[in-house]
Image (cartoon, helix red, strand yellow):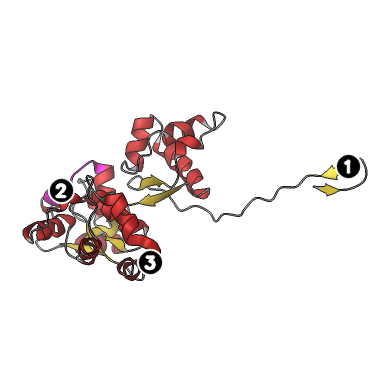
Amino acid sequence: MIPVDDANTINMKLFPHHPPPPLVRGWHVPVPKTKLASIVDPTWDLTLQKVIAHIDGVSDVRRIAWQADVSLDLATLALRHLLYYDVVLLLDLFFFGSCYAPRAPGIHDFVADVDGMLDECAAYVSVGAQRVGRFQLVRLMMSFCVGRSVMEWLRGHQEAGFDVLRHVDVRRFVQFAVIKGCLYRVHKYVVSKQYLAALATGQATPGGGGGGGASDPLQKYTDGCHSFDQIITERDLADGEIMDKLKRLPLPQGDLTVFYR
């Protein structure tokens, strides 16, 4: 309060400045950073309340919109509001066919057990009463690499004699690693040389048809700018189904290239 005179005062309240929230896509997964139920106010926007009720750290934005019975645009707008106030964060979809790789300096902090990170991880990911040992956690974390899917990573440890699924919640383990900056998601893309040439010459338009596969809805995703997460979510297809449909596109042999980045 700022007193002006004996009868008047000015009441001022300073609000923290937050940067604009990132764009929210249908294939993102919002993860709560606090108990959302404890901060919900009955006077809040009804759409926001409906969306919050379905944020579980597993469902993607498109599924949340469907479960909440709201449009995707309104759901993304509500989530950007929550991002602005830093009560949720966005992660990628989790699949056992996805690839992850170590990220510095987070991976070094994990190995060095900075701020008790290993104990925090063990408490978050362990299945059952017995916690996973520190050495085993480090061994699991360090064995991720580019080109190796989570399923291959899992199979490798199973063959080495450690039953990962019996002791570790794999989804939570990967989620913890990504949030802490120990791992990053290696995304999968597909590019068609013929479609890129059609885009360059104007025979096709971004997001439209052309380039020899105008009748197939997957054609627009073959410009190397759309991850498989986006295709999976928007076309409601599994990774294997996408690959099968891509192989059936009317394109020259060797035209399609799948790459990771």
Disc on res. 166: 2
Q: Nearer the viewer, residue 243 or 110?
A: 110
State the separation of the CA atoms marked 3 and 1.
53 Å
Type of the residue with mark 2 = Arg
Labels 2 & 3 near each other (Cβ < 8 A): no
In the displayed image of the protein, which residue is found farthest to the front?
A: 130
The residue drawn where x is 22% and y is 46% is 127
Q: Nearer the viewer, mark 3 or mark 1?
A: 3
Question: What amino acid does circle 3 point to?
Answer: Val
Upstream in sequence: badge 2 or badge 3: 3
Inter-mark Cα distance, 2 to 3: 27 Å
User: Residue 82, percent across and down?
Assistant: 49, 44
Give the quarter of the image for residue 196. Answer: bottom left
Disc tally is 3
Query: x and y percent of residue 65 in the render?
Result: 37, 35
Whether 142 is drawn above or below 214: the answer is below
Q: What SS does tag 2 mark?
A: helix
Please say whether residue 236 is one of the residues in the magenta stretch. Answer: yes
Residue where numbered disc 3 is placed: 114
* Residue span colored magenta: 235-245
**Element carrying mark 3:** helix
Q: Nearer the viewer, residue 74 or 32?
A: 32
Q: Which mark is residue 8?
A: 1
Q: CA distance from mark 2 to mark 1?
A: 68 Å
